[in-house]
Image (tube, grey):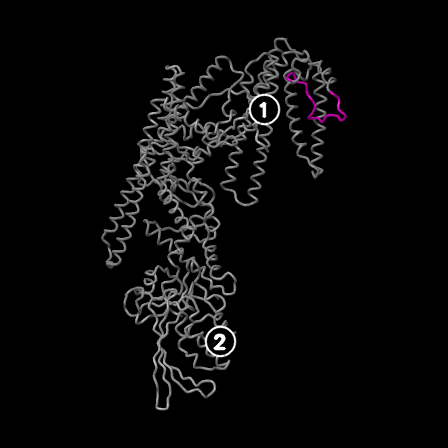
Amino acid sequence: MGRNQGGSGKKKEKLKCVTHVPLTAVRQGSSATVKVKKLKVTETGFKVTDSSFHSDVNAAIAAFTWKENNLSDSQLDVVWDRVRQSGGWDQGYVDSFINQGMLPPENDPELPKAKGKGSWNGAHFVQSSLKSLGLRIQLGHLPEERCPRPNTTWGDDFVIIDIDQIHAVGLDYCGYGQTSNGQVEQLLQRRLYPATVVNPKTAATFRVLELFELLQYESKLSTYEFYQTISRLTDNTGLHAPKDRYPTLLRIVHQWRHLKMLKRADMRLGQGYASSGIATVECSRHNAKRPLAVCDMQRGERYCNMDYITILSLQLCLLKLFLISYDIACQWFIHLLARIAQIDPSCPLLQSDVEIRFLVPKFHLPAHVPACRNRFAFMLTPGAGLGDGEAPERGWGELNPLATSTREMGPGTRRDTLDYHFGDYNWRKIIRLGDSLLKKLVTATSEVAEHVIAHQELEATIDPDQLQSWMEAMLAWELDPTSPNPYEVAVKTPTQAAVRRQLAEEEERALKMGADVSLSDEVSPCSLIAMGIDLEGEQRSLKSLTKSLWDHSQDRQITRVKLRSNALTRKLEEWFSLLQLYIPTSVFLRKREPQKKESPKPFEVRLWLPSQIGKTVSFDISLAEIEYKLRNAQAHEALGVLRRNLQIRATLYDVKDRWLRGQGANTRALNAIATVQARIAVARDEYRQARTALLSLADLLGHDKVDQEFLPLEDQDIRSMTEAEPGQGETRRRLSWIWRRVNAADATEEETKAFVAETIRVEWGKSRARAQRYQEEIKLVQEEMNRTLRFFVWKAADWRSKGLAVWMKPISVEHADGLKAYAEHQAALYESLHNAFKLQWRRVPDLVKSANDEIERPDLFYQRKQQEFEKRKKKTDKPVLPLPESADNLPNV
């Protein structure tokens, strides 16, 4: 009720009664109905008039009849203030009218329907809240249904966090008794998750929580970054920033995740704690996290952590064959069973009828010593198929970006966040089994014939009796890994130290027999040649050190190089004084060298060893024989150093990429890699120089096939076992020859034959292993496909049984129907996956049959390869235009 006197005193007094009837569930853009009763004073009494308005802005604006008032500026301000307070109008919208001296509009027909956060002021859109635009949400009733007795939220300032912005809305609960649900239940029914359970003032929509869930799975963004994005969508100017709801959203997300995990599966609750990282046990075949197989680490990968999660992940496991892969399995497995017996004597790994094979992942294996590479290789282990054991590494690639956000979380939130992501990781693996298993099968069936046929062709060249003995040794090792490893070769590789000792023993025997050929009491022929080879090494080192100098090198660096250079110069003078005793013609060779304006640097001086003299002048041929033996050992030793440092470099790169973060740690790692790379360069240069000398000495001494024994070392050959040549992928990768050529050049004829036989035996064993692994892969993938389909059938039935389960506590009919509907939805989902995968795998029998046909009939395989070759050639060949017969036929330009 209100009484208006007017501003001038001439206006008639009038009484006015306004009744506002809101809709029960107002949606964005809907209108409100306003009924107005007016009592006018007349000469005969009172006159009552009724009128109704449909306002698109706010119901309170129709409470005034603006056209019947002629107000002063002060009175106009009072009216606008009443409108703003009673109607909740945005101050910016009010100011747009006041600045022009305008009255509040009665119906405001030019104002468009509400569109989120803007309202029209006659000239442009201004930012407004949904509440100021008249939005009220009625809970506890069906849409378009009015509540006779709505209960407004406490303070009438409810906030909803949605995907487009943070909204201020008017919200009413049902107070009429239409529903027995409380405030929390009424909000959840409208897909609004409340921040508190008592008088909630903030809620997040289900869709914003679902959006954040998927966004964090894919991009690993934090809750803070997501909230800041929504906050800026609400106001990106800072002038009307919403109240900080980040702690509220953080709590909502934490609860939401926990409830979703409880809804999807049976969860074991636990308490997190501070850690330096996490460790997991995963299925190597399908790259999925095993249950109860994640633990925190405190100080690196300690055995106790890994032992514990291994035991937990294998609980209730009925398998009889375990292939356990770990990057340090060669050390970890030694006392593993004894440690497990102290923790859980009932562990399946301790059963007497269980077989266990320990392996090292393929990527990590090259960094191990040769004995580990033969004993713990996937390719050489029966039953491993084409697995590689690198499942954990693939998972870290997705989860490592979470570290920046989880390290700031509390222990419980951190653990729930990781569990949530692990669950999504496993779910994506399940729904992608259709593609991944089919891809594995296509790869195996397309390549199995090639490996089986190659192995059959190799066996055809081997003596049957020898093949039988090899087969017996191979089967014995496959049944018992403690038996002699058939993939290892006892290689006699000479070293410079061994050769020098052998030559020294020969000189000792010559002295006893009185046949000493030494021309100096201090230096023997063997010592002379060894001294020359050592001087070559010092020359290479000084050359490398000199190249490291530049214009801004420090004085101490330059001084160090000068001292090294002076010392080498004095050693060269001593060397040439001894050399002329054993090779007098070396003086003539030095004088014949072309003279330069500047004296040569110490590392540029030729030493005139027998390999450098060759057939130029005559000298004692025994010196050439000594150098040949030493150079042979030098080449083998250089290759050994090269291989060893390539393994170290591969390990350093692996550690750097996997574990190191930050500029300081990466700088130290790069320095270590640079040191190893320098050793590789030294070994490379030493081998190349030794090979050049060997080829020269072979020509002088008449040794043949030296160039075949010591191949040229190109830059593309210097790579680890896992590296491919530039431009080649894993499928076309070929092992560098430095890993294949390991033999003894000084072996006897019998030893050479035995070595060749051993080499063929090992190659036969690896060829057999490759053929078997491809055939195993086909069988494994087929069985995995069958089990996947059976799993979907079982899972659908399991969900339906949950929907029909009898509850221990009484629940309402609506609640029971909702649970049954959810269970039915999940069952239908697994049935859909079953049908989709079954349709996707319909060609599997044809692929397997085609592969078996090619194995039985190799001509089919060669025909397919020829067709593939012609198809590739047709794509790469460019059409060639025919040349004109004469110049007259050339086109004009």
Q: Which of marks 2 and 1 is in front?
A: 2
Q: Which mark is residue 687?
A: 1
Return the disc, 2 or 1, that comes first in the chain's sequence.
2
Binning the other alpha carbons within 10 Å of mark 1 as few (below 14), some (14 to 19) or many (20 upward) gives many
The image shows residue 578, relative to residue 369, as above or below, that is above
The label shown at residue 547 is none
Which residue sits furthest bottom? 43
Q: Nearer the viewer, residue 876 or 227?
A: 876
Badge 2 amino acid: Met
598 part of magenta stretch? yes
Q: In which quarter of the image is residue 289?
A: top left
Q: In which quarter of the view is residue 333 placed?
A: top left
Q: Does the magenta stretch include residue 23?
A: no
Q: In which quarter of the image is the C terminus?
A: top right
244 and 315: which one is in front?
Answer: 244
Q: Position of residue 488 (x, y in %)?
A: 44, 23
Q: Which residue lies furthest to the right in this view?
A: 597
Residue stretch rendered in magenta on the structure: 594-611
Q: Which residue is drawn at 36% across and 80% down?
A: 17
Residue 513 picture location, percent across and down: 61, 8
Q: In this view, does 534 lie to the left or right of 261?
A: right
Q: In which quarter of the image is residue 701?
A: top right
Q: Main secondary structure of the magenta part?
A: loop
The residue sitting at 45% across, 35% down in the picture is 328
Percent position of residue 466, x then y: 39, 16
Please, what is the three-letter code of the amino acid marked with disc 1? Tyr
Q: Is residue 363 shown left or right of residue 594?
A: left
Counting labels gives 2
- Is residue 788 toward the left or the right of residue 120 in the image? left
Residue at numbered disc 2: 102
